[in-house]
Structures are given as C-alpha cells and as structure tokens.
Image: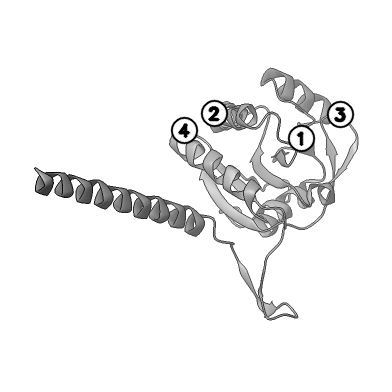
C-alpha cells in the first residue's frame, strides 16, 4: 500500500511540473508574439537596439477639434484604417473593436484610434455619426480625418500597413483589415485581422500583456 501511495505522489508531482512548464511555454510564446517590429540600423547610447516608432502628425478628431498623435505617447494604442461608407470589412472590423473597447472600458492606458482612408467624404461630423452608430466611447476611442497625403503616409511608412504602393493622390486608395498594436514607446508590437474573432481574442490577451509591461 505504501508503494502505491508513493507512486501516486510521484505522478501528482510530475503532472504539476509539466503543468508549470506548459505555463512557461505559453508565456514564452506570448512574449515572442509581442516582439518589437522593425529594428533600426542605429543603436541607443547604451548599445540597446532602437526600433521604428510611429511618427507624430496633426489631424482632426470626430468632435472637430485638432488632434495630435503625440498625445498617444505613453499609452497602448490600437489602430485601424477604415472609411465610414464602407459596406464590406470596415463594419466588421469596427464591431470587433467594440469588443476590445468593452474588455478595457475602464482602462485609461489604452487608446483606440481609427483613421479614415476617405477624408474627402469622412468629415468630422460623419465620423461622429459613425462613432455613435457603434456606441464608441470617444474619450477612449478617436476617429480621425485630415489631409489624405498625411493619412496615407502614416498608414504606409508610419504603421507599415501591408498595402499596395501609392503616393496619396486622388487615385490612391488603401483598404486593409489589419489592426495594429502599438506599445507605450510607440513601437509596433503586432498585426491582427480585424475580421477574425479568434485573432481578436489573441489581441485582447496581448493588450493585457503590454499593459503589465514596464
């Protein structure tokens, strides 16, 4: 009887160790998934790697007031590029963003930013109506418009959105389902399909990880 008791204790111990190892592996996977994107050729003065950061631009928010992306520094940022008259992927993306907003409704260190790719039609007033349609909390979630060239340069060379090349002229158009996650230091940390609920589940977990990051 003592023998079988010792065997039982051994298997409980073994299961516990394997379970802890599994947790460590899952954590490691999460950290790898949140690696910083786009290292620069230059190094910091202490020898650390420097990474691409989102540039600062001046735009107009849905309330008609000027908005500087500099105000996002020190915050976790989730960004997307959409247009209000879109009947395809944009409403699906925005619906998924409402899930994220609901999950972090009390979190002051997370900001959601939706940039229009159709600024000629998406005035501040139309963006306000769009925000109301999706019950957006515009303290946490901003809808932004402005000069097309600035918005398109921001999409391509700021957020490195994987889209066709273009110069932001009247014939240029960007359409992407990607949500971009940015950390407190303005470094890109992940891309997620905004129409995939499973990807959004992962995104919510990753946001929680970044909020704990020092």
Q: Nearer the viewer, mark 2 or mark 4?
A: 4
Task: Give the number of the disc on residue 63.
Answer: 3
Does the residue at mark 2 contact the one at mark 1 (Cβ under 8 Å)?
no
Task: Give the number of the disc on residue 2.
Answer: none
| Along the viewing direction, whichever of 93 and 187 lies nearer the viewer | 187
Task: Give the number of the disc on residue 142.
Answer: 1
> Marks 2/4: CA distance?
10 Å
The vertical placement of 20 against 82, above or below, is below
| Along the viewing direction, whichever of 10 and 128 lies nearer the viewer | 10
Residue 89 visible in the picture: yes
Please give left or right for residue 27 compared with residue 126 in the image. Answer: left
Does the residue at mark 3 contact the one at mark 4 (Cβ under 8 Å)?
no
Name the quadrant of the N terminus.
Answer: top left
Residue 90 image position (x, y, % from top left): 59, 32
The vertical placement of 52 against 48, above or below, is above
How many numbered tags mark residues here?
A: 4
| Mark 2 or mark 1: whose residue is earlier in sequence | 2
| Mark 4 or mark 1: whose residue is earlier in sequence | 1
Residue at 61 percent of width and 70 percent of height: 39
Please give left or right for residue 62 compared with residue 48 in the image. Answer: right
The vertical placement of 181 against 105, above or below, is below
| Mark 2 or mark 4: whose residue is earlier in sequence | 2
Please give left or right for residue 1 compared with residue 40 in the image. Answer: left
Residue 8 image position (x, y, % from top left): 18, 45
> Marks 3/2: CA distance?
23 Å
Q: Rate crowding at label 3 as few (under 14), some (14 to 19) or many (20 or more) other CA atoms within 10 Å.
A: some
**Mark 2 falls on what kind of element?**
helix
Report which residue position mark 2 lands on.
92
| Along the viewing direction, whichever of 212 and 173 lies nearer the viewer | 212
Task: Give the number of the disc on residue 197.
Answer: 4
Quarter of the view holding residue 124: top right
């Amino acid at each position: 009887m003592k023998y079988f008791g010792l065997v039982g204790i051994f298997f409980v111990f073994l299961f516990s160790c394997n379970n802890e190892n599994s947790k460590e592996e899952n954590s490691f996977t999460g950290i790898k998934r949140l690696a910083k994107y786009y290292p620069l050729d230059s190094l910091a003065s202490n020898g650390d790697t420097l990474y691409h950061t989102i540039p600062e631009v001046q735009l107009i928010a849905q309330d008609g007031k000027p908005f500087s992306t500099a105000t996002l520094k020190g915050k976790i940022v989730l960004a997307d590029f959409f247009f209000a008259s879109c009947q395809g992927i944009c409403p699906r993306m925005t619906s998924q963003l409402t899930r994220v907003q609901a999950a972090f409704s009390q979190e002051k260190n997370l900001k959601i930013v939706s940039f229009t790719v159709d600024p000629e039609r998406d005035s501040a007033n139309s963006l306000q109506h769009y925000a109301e349609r999706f019950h957006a909390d515009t303290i946490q979630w901003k809808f932004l418009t402005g000069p097309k060239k600035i918005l398109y340069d921001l999409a391509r060379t700021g957020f490195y959105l994987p889209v066709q090349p273009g110069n932001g002229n009247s014939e240029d158009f960007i359409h992407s389902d990607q949500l971009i996650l940015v950390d407190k230091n303005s470094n890109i940390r992940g891309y997620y399909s905004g129409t995939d609920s499973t990807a959004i589940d992962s995104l919510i977990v990753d946001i929680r990880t970044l909020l704990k990051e020092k």
